[in-house]
Amino acid sequence: MKSNAMMTSNKVVFVVNAGSEESAGIPHLLDEIGCIAQTVGSPAELKELLKEEACMAVIMDIDSVVVNNRTIKDLASSFPAIPFLCLSKERLHPELQDSIRDHIYACLSKPVDPDELFYWLKCIQEDDKGI
């Protein structure tokens, strides 16, 4: 996986995780490809952090943090340049249907497939460069 290191070199990714063991390994995976992971405990904490620091993307474990359509819409509207990815072990989230359709860059299943995560981060980086 080190062959992907140049893909996201020196990029910050915020990982919103309120203690889920299933997404606790995400920072290690991000480190493998040269990203800097910063774990955040809640959407409110994330919003404050995004006001002060830039990031390449946000990965939100929606199984571990309380979110609804309004929360996601507020974050995405406040920070439109930042792609939001969601993690969940559930395949469907009817209560988040609008947010997933309109504001989420990608949804990944848990346990996370490293190749899938790396693919989406590469897409984000390419979108950022206008490729």
Image (cartoon, rainbow, N blue to C red):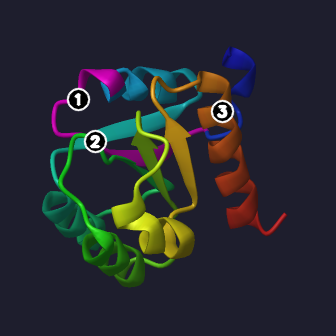
Q: Amino acid at mark 3?
A: Glu
Position of 102 with respect to 25 (left or right) is right
For disc 2, the marked residue is 63
When asked about the image quadrant of residue 113, the answer is top right
For disc 1, the marked residue is 20
Q: Is 117 included in the stretch rendered in magenta?
A: no
Percent x, y for residue 6?
71, 33
For disc 3, the marked residue is 116
* Residue 88, numbered circle: none
| Rendered residue at 16%/31% (across/down) | 19
Percent x, y for residue 125?
68, 54
Nearer to us in this view, 112 or 16: 112
Q: Is residue 39 above or below residue 79?
A: above
- The range drawn in magenta is 9-22
Quadrant containing the N terminus in the rendered view: top right
| Rendered residue at 59%/35% (across/down) | 117
